[in-house]
């Protein structure tokens, strides 16, 4: 649950939440997307109940070797795509907030190397890192909220009649970020708690956190939200305590930790997906291939400072996520389960 | 398996080493990624912006003066600890860059606490564009006007352990509590400008050269102001003593020097007096101190203000603070009526009888009514400016009117009436 939450919350910190539509549409769009997500995770939960010890690639491999290899490659490509997006968002964040600090390819390369090491150590190491990142993130949200408490005002809230096009855009935008759907069909054999609890727990946790962030941002920043590139980070520049004048430097480590956890878990699932089908090659070779590929794919965009994703890109991401995270589990839901199905 | 693990561990160590080397190399990098030591940076405490006669930007940076700060020698409290550097260029960033060239150091704006605009700044567009997008500038910095040049204010030397920019910030904070200054944080200005098609209120900071003549000079300096239209009286009433009915706050009339009686401190005092109404991102007119006090009461932001109330033949001090605000919006005879109910608490320094307290409270209440209606008359009736958060009230109470407002704010504002109801609590 913590891994899934940490992997997903990265977008709440970096993406530009209010630049496309107002806060009303944002909240409605986000709420709808959460409901949809609650529904589309059902196939993977059923799959887990039927085959709790086998990930989706193993199931495919049992049916057909070629199918297993193809699905493994598909998941690995999805992991690389998601890492590409993550690196570009993180690069953009560094580009805007800390320009001329370091060459951005070095920053992204450093995250890739550290994430590679975590993925190399296995899911336990990632889970521990995710726990630290989760605590740090929640702590930073709470501290920033407390520091800004006196600066919040309901007069900063501007309501607007929601427009259908804005809401649908928000839903579409959110759906392109359902990374849990890609992660969980591979990860669930490693999960100690029940799948439903993990998935719905992560979704509920994200719902609460994103609502909290939206409320704090809106009550504090008001109309500045419409022009802010990183509203959550801007809260840090505005918040101050008796000891610390600005809290943005406090938010930065949370950002880096969350980015690192997400990268490492994506590398890990890519490795597992490929090594399930291609058993002759050592799994760590795949890990290396995935890390290098993700970095290499992102490098041209980083060097050319291309940060934005077009609507077409988002549509492709959405299709890939739904194909791998919803349709495939749905297909494998049919048929007999394993012996320990009812355990 | 074992071989594979060893191989990957070696690979990892190599990769980490490569990145460490790269990081070390970047520490020695030149050009864009050149690393700067602390002594290669100048910490900017305040920034002043003026417009020269030929329309260029004159940017003044107030920075730490090494001779007073103990950089080379032990801290010397007898010397001023700030200095200024100014340069002129076509744009603000270019002027800052020239300042950096003069100093041979890079300016760090992350600790800037104040952006001061000289009276020559007649268009806020380039200034707002710069401060919103400038690297590192906090949303909480104070932004204000001055009736002279920003350079003159920032040139004030303070030898009390604080910068004049820092002292100014303290003056702002105290004035805000006392209700004689408007909100002046950058985020508030951005909010107001975004919500109201470029309307905001910025406090005016003034310099007292000679406190003995200060009262007289304040009156004279008022007439020197030239922010678009002049105010209704042709001059600005200034100073605490000008608060109607003898009311006033004595705690925040100046700042800049801690050594109260010294000649130097007297020469460097500054105070907040009135505010500039900005419309369409251009300074439009000036609000007096009384009007600002009224605005603060309407916004329910007065933490503590002392009024002098008549009690028989004598005057007594009453401590006043805003506690609650409640607004109702209604439409009467094609007019949009805002009924603002303000709960205000009164505290007396001396134990009076209940009758005496009521009598004093009545006098203070009348004074506050007068201040509030002065503010309404000036901002709404004369200037047609939305500085009372009308857009927000309409948005929260009547969405149809809000939409009308967004289409044509000027027309809607002409239809607005504000009624003040005070609920004094002794």
Image (cartoon, rainbow, N blue to C red):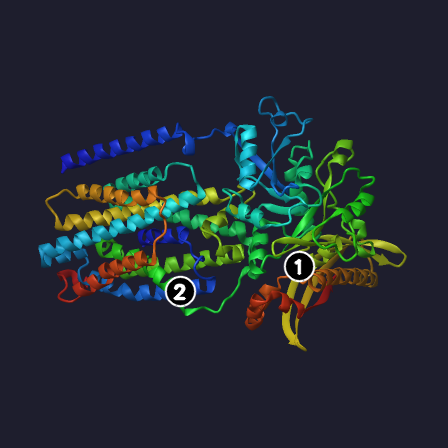
Query: Residue extending furthest bottom?
Result: B333
* Chain of the residue under the numbered disc 1 shown in the image: B
Q: Is residue A197 above or below residue B19?
A: below
- Relative depth, front residue between A26 and A308: A308
Estimate the x, y position of residue A328 in percent, counting from the top left.
20, 61
Q: Chain of mark 2?
A: A
Corner quadrant of residue B130: top right
Q: Which residue is mark 2?
A: A29
Residue at x-position 80% and y-position 43% = B217
Mark 1 Cα-neighbour bin, 10 Å: few <14, some 14–19, many ≥20: many
Q: Quadrant of the N terminus of chain A?
A: bottom left
- How crowded pointer 2 is (Cα within 10 Å; few <14, some 14-19, many 20+) is rated as many
Percent coordinates x, y for residue A256 in the rendering: 38, 43
Q: Residue at x 66, y 59 (%)?
A: B300
Q: Is residue B324 left or right of residue B424?
A: left
Q: Nearer the viewer, mark 1 or mark 2?
A: 2
Residue marked by disc 1: B300
Please tell me which residue lies in front, B219 or B360.
B219
Residue A178 seen in the current view: no
Q: Which mark is residue B122?
A: none
User: What x and y, as percent, mark residue B90?
Assistant: 57, 41
Q: Quadrant of the C terminus of chain A?
A: bottom left
Q: Secondary structure at mark 2?
A: helix
In whole angstroms, how far apart are the C-alphas of marks 1 and 2? Answer: 35 Å
């Amino acid at each position: 649950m913590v891994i899934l939450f940490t992997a997903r919350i990265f977008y709440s910190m970096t993406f530009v939440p209010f630049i496309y539509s107002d806060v009303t549409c944002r909240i409605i769009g986000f709420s709808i997307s959460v409901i949809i997500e609650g529904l589309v995770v059902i196939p993977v939960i059923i799959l887990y109940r039927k085959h709790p010890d086998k990930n989706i690639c193993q199931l495919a491999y049992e049916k057909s070797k070629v199918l297993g290899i193809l699905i493994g490659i598909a998941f690995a490509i999805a992991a690389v795509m998601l890492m590409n997006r993550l690196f570009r968002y993180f690069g953009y964040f560094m580009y805007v907030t800390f320009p001329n600090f370091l060459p951005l390819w070095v920053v992204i390369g450093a995250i890739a190397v550290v994430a590679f090491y975590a993925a190399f150590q296995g899911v336990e190491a990632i889970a521990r890192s995710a726990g630290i990142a989760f605590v740090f993130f929640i702590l930073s949200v709470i501290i920033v909220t407390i520091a800004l408490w006196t600066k919040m005002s309901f007069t900063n809230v501007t309501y607007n009649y929601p427009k259908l096009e804005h809401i649908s855009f928000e839903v579409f935008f959110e759906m392109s970020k359902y990374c849990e759907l890609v992660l969980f069909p591979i990860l669930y054999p490693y999960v100690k708690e029940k799948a439903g609890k993990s998935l719905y727990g992560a979704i509920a946790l994200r719902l609460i956190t994103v609502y909290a962030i939206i409320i704090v941002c809106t009550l504090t920043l008001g109309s500045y939200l419409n022009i802010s590139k990183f509203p959550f980070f801007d809260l840090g520049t505005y918040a101050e305590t008796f000891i610390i004048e600005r809290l943005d430097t406090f938010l930065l480590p949370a950002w880096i930790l969350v980015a690192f956890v997400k990268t490492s878990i994506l590398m890990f699932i890519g490795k597992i997906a490929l090594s399930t089908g291609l058993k002759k090659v050592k799994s760590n070779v795949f890990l290396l291939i995935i890390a290098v590929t993700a970095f290499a794919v992102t490098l041209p965009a980083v060097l050319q400072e291309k940060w934005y994703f077009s609507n077409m890109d988002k549509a492709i991401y959405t299709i890939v996520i739904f194909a791998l995270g919803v349709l495939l589990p749905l297909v494998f839901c049919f048929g007999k389960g394993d012996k320990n199905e009812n355990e | 398996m074992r071989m594979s693990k060893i191989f990957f561990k070696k690979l990892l160590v190599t990769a980490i080493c490569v990145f460490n080397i790269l990081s070390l190399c970047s520490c020695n990098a030149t050009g864009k990624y050149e690393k700067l030591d602390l002594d290669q940076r100048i910490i900017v405490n305040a920034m002043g912006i003026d417009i020269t006669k030929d329309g260029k930007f004159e940017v003044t940076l107030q920075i730490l003066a090494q001779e007073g700060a103990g950089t080379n020698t032990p801290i010397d409290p007898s010397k001023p600890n700030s200095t200024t550097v100014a340069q002129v260029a076509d744009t603000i960033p270019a002027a800052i860059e020239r300042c950096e060239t003069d100093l041979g150091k890079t300016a760090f704006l992350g600790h800037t606490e104040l952006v001061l605009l000289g009276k020559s700044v007649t268009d806020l567009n380039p200034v707002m564009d710069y401060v919103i997008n400038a690297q590192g500038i906090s949303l909480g910095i104070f932004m204000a006007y001055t009736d002279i040049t920003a350079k003159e204010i920032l040139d004030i030397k303070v030898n009390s352990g604080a910068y004049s920019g820092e002292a100014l910030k303290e003056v702002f904070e105290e004035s805000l509590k006392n209700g004689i200054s408007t909100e002046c944080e950058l985020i508030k200005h951005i909010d107001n400008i975004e919500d109201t098609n470029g309307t905001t209120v910025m406090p005016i900071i003034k310099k007292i050269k000679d406190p003995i003549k200060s009262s007289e000079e304040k009156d004279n300096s008022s007439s020197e102001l030239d922010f678009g239209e002049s105010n209704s009286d042709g001059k600005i009433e200034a100073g605490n003593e000008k608060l109607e009915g003898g009311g006033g706050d004595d705690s925040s009339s100046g700042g800049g020097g801690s050594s109260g009686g010294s000649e130097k401190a007297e020469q460097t005092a500054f105070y907040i007096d009135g505010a500039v109404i900005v419309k369409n991102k251009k300074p439009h007119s000036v609000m007096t101190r009384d009007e600002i006090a009224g605005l603060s009461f309407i916004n329910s932001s007065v933490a503590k203000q002392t009024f002098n109330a008549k009690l028989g033949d004598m005057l007594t001090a009453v401590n006043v603070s805003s506690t609650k605000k409640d607004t109702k919006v209604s439409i009467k005879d094609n007019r949009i009526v805002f009924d603002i109910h303000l709960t205000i608490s009164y505290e007396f320094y001396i134990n009076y009888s209940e009758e005496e307290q009521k009598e004093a409270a009545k006098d203070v209440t009348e004074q506050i009514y007068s201040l509030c209606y002065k503010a309404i008359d000036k901002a709404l009736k004369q200037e047609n400016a939305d500085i009372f958060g009308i857009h927000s009230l309409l948005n929260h109470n009547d969405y149809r009117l809000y939409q009308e407002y967004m289409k044509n704010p000027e027309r809607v504002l002409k239809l607005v009436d504000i009624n003040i109801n005070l609920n004094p609590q002794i």
